[in-house]
Amino acid sequence: QVQLVESGGGLVQPGGSLRLSCAASGSIITIYDMAWYRQAPGKQRELVALVPRAGVTIYDDSVKGRFTISRDGAKNTVYLQMNSLKPEDTAVYYCYARIRTPLVDSVPYWGQGTQVTVSS
């Protein structure tokens, strides 16, 4: 069994910053991709940023230059540093990881979601 536990969401004023964290735990052999998605009310879930185990990090155009994704392999944790936040960044943010377990080579897992609200 694998779990992704997120933390760090909250209410912030426009122009402010937040840092999201997501720790994976359980029967993990390898973590391939780790990513953050978000879903605003009435909209589809969208990719915000993805960091592979090896390779190029990907960002949605709307967050380039403002958000930074990083991962700590020793802690099985992914972070999202969000700066210069805008009201349109308001959404539920979901952690994602593609993981190899003892039983399956590649399985997608999702966190429970954390609310980020940008408002004055």
Image: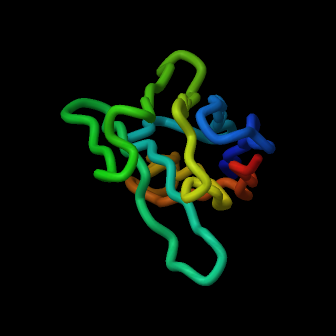
Residue 94 seen from this side: no
Residue 105 seen from this side: yes
- Quadrant of residue 85 in the image? top right
- Quadrant of residue 38 in the image? bottom right
Position above or below: 11 against 41: above
At 44% from the left edge and 66% from the top edge, which residue is drawn? 46
- Quadrant of residue 111 in the image? bottom right
Query: Outermost residue toward the left?
Result: 55
In this picture, residue 47 sits left or right of residue 85: left
Query: Outermost residue toward the front?
Result: 120
At 40% from the left edge and 56% from the top edge, which residue is drawn? 106
Query: Outermost residue toward the top?
Result: 74
3 and 42: which one is in front? 42
Instruction: From the top left corner, tell me how far across and down residue 15 is, in percent.
Output: 59, 34
In this picture, residue 59 sits left or right of residue 119: left
At 54% from the left edge and 34% from the top edge, which residue is drawn? 82
At 66% from the left edge and 76% from the top edge, which residue is drawn? 41
Instruction: From the top left corner, tell me how far across and down residue 93 is, in percent.
Output: 62, 54
In this picture, residue 88 sits left or right of residue 19: left
